Amino acid sequence: MELLEQEYKNLVNGDRMANGRWIDIFSPVDGSLCGRVPAMSREDIDQAVLGCRQAQEKWQRTPVFKRAEILYRAADLLEQQAEEIAGMLVMEIAKDKKSALSEVKRSADLLRYTADVGKNSRGEAIFGDNFPGGSRNKMSFVSRVPMGTVLAVSPFNYPVNLSVSKIAPALMGGNTVLLKPATQGAVSALMTAYLLDKAGLPKGVLNTVTGRGSEIGDYTVTHPGVDFVNFTGSTQVGEHISQICSMKPMIMELGGKDAAIVLEDGDLNFAADNIVDGAYSYSGQRCTAVKRILAVEPVAGRLVEKLKTRIERLKQGDPREEGVTITPLISREAADAAQKLIDDALQKGAELIIGNRREGNLLAPTLIDKVTTDMELAWIEPFAPVLPILRVKNAAQAVEIANRSEYGLQSSVFTSSIDRAFAIASRLEVGTVQINNKTERGPDNFPFLGVKNSGMGTQGVKYSIEAMTRPKAVTINLRGGSF
Ligand code: NAP
Ligand code: G3P
């Protein structure tokens, strides 16, 4: 990792490390050292913020097409380095190789789409409009201007995609960006930031802050030099940040408990395929993972059998091996939390269909039937390959239980009637309803939002650019008169 450290030091001007401390990042796969990132001090953070602010004026006056050119170049560089960055994702966050490569590729696509939005007629998200006043002598000219320095805080499960999904629209909107990646995932995130820098970003337009959120997080989010916070992470941390950052504009993407509603007229094979993929890919460590099934009684038994057959085929183990889906969770604490939910459900009478086996952080894909609403697993986000089935009487009860959750990210509805699907979708209190599909965010240009404890604000390129810019009105007052 010497090379990366050197590159990183170039990126953040290594001699700025006032305290010279580093954090060793170890792999959850085999305990090997993935890399080291600076444990930055408050002085280092002040310097990083100052760098952004000094670069702001020139950057926001950079023509939109020139910003776009840099993003296009960054996309090419990301694709050229895809194998290397994916290899780091595999080791640093135990993401299977296929998902890791997919994360890098989709991030390159996101950069290009963002550049497109800026460069061509779809750039309306950046440009403003004008309004004639009531009298003929007043005219208001409205343009969109950047919020200023955007703090992008990304989570461990998508260190590349959920950094780029903030950085690219922020830059296209004329903002400078301070990236604070999750510590577990920081090496992958810094490799990505480094490529953005290499693509031609002027010095200071993108800076990075590393260090444990519990130590430097509060200082960074409340920093007076930070004008906007774009956060993705747990609801617990998100709530904390929103409390200490009063009056600071922000976007939050938080936890989820996405429900897959399966009705008696749904295609059970199709639903089972989608649910298994949606619940167990990357070991369920996706905010949009299917995290509970609400199945009507008449089909629940057959659905369970179909799910079990598919789960038995899932390969678990080392993410470096071909075809592995179930990999070690990010930490022992995460595995302990998931195990606690399993134990609670089984002690209260739920029925284990498959799984509930553990080797260290590696949890076997687990399916638990006849989960009831008095069990924690019905409501708490496991962020693990653990899926509860709640049997319901009908669609109305499914909607009622779905909406009782503190979360509101996404839901799926499996039915053959498009009319029923839309009727149910209109009643679900979530950001997105997937009709006959697993819950998922992509493609990244789609609007993506959570309601209730799943977040606030909307991401999705065009929406993100709008959120990280604001209208600025200049009113011209004519004195009138004839000509
Ligand atoms: P997390 O523990 O909340 O951490 C998220 C980020 O916040 C990390 O970069 C973390 O840094 C940082 N952080 C921690 N405390 C902070 C503070 N006081 N101030 C500022 N930043 C702070 O979440 P995670 O474990 O990385 O990710 C899993 C969670 O994120 C799950 O709940 C999942 O549902 C949610 N998530 C939601 C979405 C979505 O799109 N809605 C997407 C992905 C994940 P450190 O790593 O250094 O602690
Ligand atoms: O959990 C992160 C969120 O961005 C999920 O993306 O495409 O896996 O649904 P996706």
Image (spheres, grey):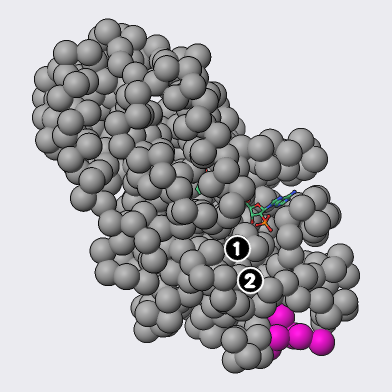
Viewed as shown, does residue 278 lie left or right of 461? left
- Name the amino acid type tagged 2: Ile
Q: Which residue is mark 1?
A: 184
- Name the amino acid type tagged 1: Gln
Contact, mark 1 vs mark 2 (Cβ under 8 Å): yes
Disc number for residue 25: 2
| Along the viewing direction, whichever of 226 and 351 lies nearer the viewer | 351
At label 2, counting other C-alpha atoms closer than 10 Å, the crowd grade (few under 14, some 14-19, many 20 or more) is some
Q: Residue at x 67, y 58 (%)?
A: 151
Residue stretch in magenta: 9-15
* Rendered location of residue 125, percent (x, y): 46, 52
Viewed as shown, does residue 141 lie left or right of 79? right
State whether residue 208 is above or below residue 273.
Answer: below
Q: Which type of secondary structure does the marked residue at label 1 adopt?
A: loop
Q: Residue at x 34, y 51 (%)?
A: 281
Q: Residue at x 25, y 44 (%)?
A: 311
Q: Residue 390: in sight, yes or no?
A: no
Q: Residue at x 22, y 13 (%)?
A: 297
Q: Residue 29: in sight, yes or no?
A: yes
Q: For disc 1, does the CB lie below 8 Å from ligand 1?
A: yes
Q: Which type of secondary structure does the marked residue at label 2 adopt?
A: strand
Q: For disc 2, does the CB lie below 8 Å from ligand 1?
A: no
* Rendered location of residue 53, percent (x, y): 76, 68
Mark 1 to mark 2: distance in Å?
Answer: 7 Å
